[in-house]
């Protein structure tokens, strides 16, 4: 179990609500020590996935394991080692921050009030303040501080950045970075803001309509998915490689996207009177192109 | 030294950070013996994944630009000055290549392009007020 390089694995995880498959045979692999961005449009199934990991709902079929513990059979063991922050977490509004932290401390056998206090004092939140008097950004920070009070090995952040103003968001991002730097802690963060994800994540899973259409280290993804431009003589015939996406043809130039780039590709496309240009794509471009394409999972 | 990164750019964050460090050394903003922030500090400041910063440090150390003194942090290495000259030329060559691509695409002649480049150098010299 200790050799397992993954903190979270799911195997064909499926959750149906009536006829709707909120999760459709999702097999995800979240490496230990990574910040894994679980992304996708609204309604893609991201929160359902997190709720399955926490065993707040039972999967219809398939399995999920966190740190080697099956989430259904060993849900108590899982919750002890997992911290969870949700966007609209019901913090007890009438409580003081200190009371809320104390209440949460009672839920776990192990608790470090020092960790919680350090974060709160670093971000300038008074522990005697009532939660209802805090801004949305401050509440997010309280949620994060308290979620790591039991020093979890895995942190699940469900839309933790959604709806925050830019300043609060930077502060939350900074604290996520600080929090994950503890030895081997793994962070799974769901959200839609691609720029935020691109900043802090090293692995990306992309969920569309309950299906994980892509899972990859971010670097690999950017190295493999490229936009290729080939300039050629007017109306010259020329063969596109298999799997070319988003093809745009104009008389003197053909553009396409490949999900399988290697250095051999430009060489194989070059020829007399042709010039090949390779362009990097931003994560946003990559998602837009993959979400539109009918291809199966890119791994 | 590092003026923030642009997550929306198509240039991977890893490369943005590495390039900025190289450019800072090439431009003399960082000199041999200067100490760099810790991985955690820089990740927090740039708001990027600490694994990414660690990888940049590791790779630049392998290339000889940085050196890690055990338990004492990461420094610009003594070889960095020699590397800086090569880097200056490489950085310039890369930019000129991009410009050259535009020159071809716009169908401008070599002579006209060189004339424009000469003008740019002349203007820049006037701005700086030096007579080299």
Image (spheres, rainbow, N blue to C red):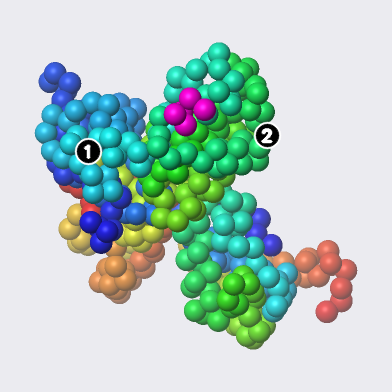
Q: Percent from the top left, x then y, of residue A11? A: 16, 44
Disc 1 versus disc 2: nearer the observer: 1
In the image, residue B111 above or below residue A118? below
- In the picture, measured across the screen, residue A110 lies left or right of residue B67, that is left
Residue under label 1: A74
Mark before the other along the chain sequence, 1 or 2: 1
Q: What residue lies at 36% left-to-right and 51% top-to-bottom?
A: A203
The kind of secondary structure element at disc 1 is loop
Q: Percent from the top left, x then y, of residue A157? A: 41, 36
Dividing the picture into quadrants, the one containing residue A279 is bottom left
Membership of A100 in magenta stretch: no
Q: Which mark is residue A124?
A: 2
Write down the region rendered in magenta.
Answer: A102-106
The kind of secondary structure element at disc 2 is loop
- In the picture, measured across the screen, residue A144 lies left or right of residue A25, that is right
Q: What residue lies at 78% left-to-right and 66% top-to-bottom?
A: B123
Closer to the camera in the image, A14 or A128: A128
Q: What residue lies at 34% left-to-right and 60% top-to-bottom?
A: A220
Gap in angstroms between the C-alphas marked 1 and 2: 37 Å
Q: Percent from the top left, x then y, of residue A194? A: 44, 41
**Total marks placed:** 2
């Amino acid at each position: 179990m200790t050799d397992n390089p993954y903190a979270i694995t799911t195997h064909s995880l499926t959750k149906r609500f009536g006829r709707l498959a909120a999760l459709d045979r999702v097999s995800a692999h979240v490496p230990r020590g990574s910040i894994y961005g679980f992304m996708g449009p609204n309604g893609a199934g991201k929160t359902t996935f997190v709720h399955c990991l926490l065993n707040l709902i039972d999967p219809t079929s398939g399995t999920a394991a966190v740190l080697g513990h099956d989430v259904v059979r060993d849900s108590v063991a899982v919750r002890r080692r997992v911290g969870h922050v949700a966007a609209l977490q019901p913090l007890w509004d009438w409580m003081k921050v200190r009371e809320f932290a104390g209440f949460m401390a009672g839920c776990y056998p192990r608790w470090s009030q020092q960790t919680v206090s350090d974060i709160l004092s670093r971000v300038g939140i008074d522990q005697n303040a009532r939660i209802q008097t805090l801004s949305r950004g401050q509440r997010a920070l309280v949620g994060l501080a308290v979620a790591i009070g039991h020093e979890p090995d895995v942190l699940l952040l469900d839309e933790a950045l959604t709806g925050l103003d830019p300043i609060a968001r930077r502060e939350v991002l900074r604290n996520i970075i600080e929090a994950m730097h503890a030895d081997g802690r793994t962070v799974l963060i769901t959200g839609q803001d691609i720029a935020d994800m691109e900043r802090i994540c090293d692995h990306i899973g992309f969920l569309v309509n309950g299906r994980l259409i892509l899972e990859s280290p971010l670097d690999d993804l950017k190295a493999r998915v490229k936009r290729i431009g080939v300039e050629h003589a007017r109306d010259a015939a020329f063969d596109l490689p298999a799997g070319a996406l988003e093809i745009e043809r104009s008389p003197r130039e053909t553009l396409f996207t490949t999900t399988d780039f290697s250095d051999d590709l430009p060489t194989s496309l070059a020829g007399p009177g042709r010039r090949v240009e390779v362009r990097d794509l931003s994560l946003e471009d990559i998602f837009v192109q993959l979400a539109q394409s009918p291809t199966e999972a890119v791994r | 030294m590092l003026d923030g990164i642009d997550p929306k750019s198509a240039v991977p964050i890893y490369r943005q950070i590495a390039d900025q460090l190289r450019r800072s050394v090439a431009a003399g903003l960082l000199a041999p013996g200067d100490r760099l922030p810790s991985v955690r500090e820089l990740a927090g400041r740039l708001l990027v994944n600490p694994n990414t910063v660690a990888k940049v440090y590791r790779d630049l150390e392998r290339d000889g630009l940085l050196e890690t003194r055990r338990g004492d942090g990461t420094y610009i290495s003594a070889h960095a000055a020699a590397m800086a000259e090569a880097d200056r030329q490489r950085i310039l060559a890369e930019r000129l290549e991009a410009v050259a691509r535009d020159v071809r695409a716009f169908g401008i002649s070599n002579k006209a392009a060189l004339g424009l480049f000469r003008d740019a150098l002349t203007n820049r010299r006037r701005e700086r007020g030096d007579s080299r």
